[in-house]
Amino acid sequence: MPELQEIRAIHDLPFPDLIYRAATVHREHWNPNQIQFCTLDSIKTGACPEDCAYCPQAARFNTGVAPEPLKERERVLDGARRALANGSTRYCMGASWREVRDGSAFEQVLEIVKDVAALGLEVCVTLGMLNEDQAKRLKAAGCAVYNHNIDSSRAFYETIVSTHTFEQRLQTIRAVRAAGLEVCCGGIVGMGEKIEDSIHFLHELTLMDPPPESIPINQLVPVPGTPLEDMDPPPPLEFIRMIAAARILFPRSRIRLSAGRASMSIETQALAFLAGANSIFTGEKLLITPNSKAGQDHEMLSAMGMRVE
């Protein structure tokens, strides 16, 4: 496992060297001209009891998000069919729960997972904390991947969330892995963290054995009403450094360019792809925050001579 100073040395390489190294690693393991499309659907929105400082779905923040109950099965399937038609191969479903609780709502989610998997889509869910038995039930229903982000370094994480601990995040990830599901685990850039926090975040991911199959790198989308509403976006090159460092450290993982794309230029996104990002969320919303429109994504890849995987 790389030490912290090794990760910092990679991150701090002269930019041309960093991009060249990341692109070289990327080409050794992936087709550099292909991008995986994923779609993220909020199947239960708002009224979350947690206090994640970046999240507009927290009930305690006045963000104007109207709580919605668990979405009807047919509405979810309609969205999944549209995603499939647009080129998505992975369909991710998120519910604003603190944790999975056994009962009718979880049973409904299991049925939805079965139906979406039957369409031929790779199914990913993010439902908060859960135990190994619940993860096994998701896998049996057809779920392939569970998303549970660690967001930042251990120390910084506990300045932005107080209603659960960093260790609880890791416990859920261990339960997911023990159940035989793939792990999707990433972070957020632009919450006010220091470079050292970003390095510690990457180091935490290297300690996972095996590493996450999918690593989303998000740029904070500041939402009015949340404690982070006034944060300025990180410098684009600093964001690209995180993409490149992640690609070098995790050659076989999907590195997903995730939230924040709606405010990124095409040039920034092109640099991210050059640095090793090979998956994006497409669709007009990521849960409830704005995202690039699907047609724009097809046009962007076409302009770059790239294609949907």
Image (cartoon, grey):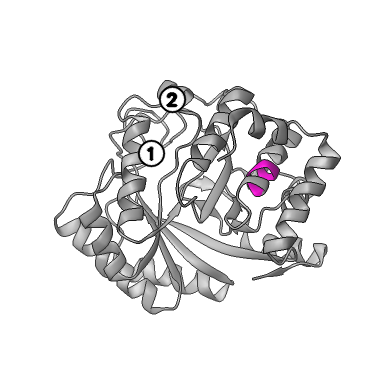
Is residue 142 or residue 25 the one in the foreground?
A: 25
Residue 160 is marked as 2
> Mark 2 against mark 1, which lies toward the viewer?
2
* Secondary structure mainly formed by the magenta segment: helix
- Residue 259 in the image: state x and y as whole percent: 57, 45
Q: Earlier along the polypeptide chain: callout 2 or callout 1? A: 1
> In the rendering, at what x and y percent does residue 263 appear?
67, 42
Instruction: Tell me the amino acid under the disc marked 1.
Output: Gln
| Magenta span includes 143 | no
Asked if residue 246 can be seen in this view, the reply is: yes
Residue pictured at 60% horizontal, 24% vertical: 196
* Residue for badge 1: 57
Residue reaching furthest to the right: 16
| Magenta stretch, residue numbers | 243-247
Element under disc 2: helix
Left or right: 274 with respect to 222? right
Judge whether residue 233 can be spotted in this image: no
Kind of residue at badge 2: Ile
Q: Nearer the viewer, residue 141 or 245?
A: 245
* Residue placed most toward the observer, 148 or 293: 148
Whether the magenta-drawn stretch holds residue 246 is answered as: yes
Q: Residue at x 19, y 62 (%)?
A: 107
Q: Position of residue 3 (x, y in %)?
A: 59, 32
Q: Secondary structure at mark 1?
A: loop
Q: How many marks?
A: 2
Vertical placement of residue 307 versus 213, above or below: below
Quadrant including the N terminus: top right
Residue at 45% across / 49% down in the picture?
209
**Contact, CB < 8 Å: mark 2 with mark 1?**
no
Q: Residues within 10 Å of mark 2 (few under 14, many from 20)?
A: some
Q: Which quadrant does the C terminus fall into? A: bottom right
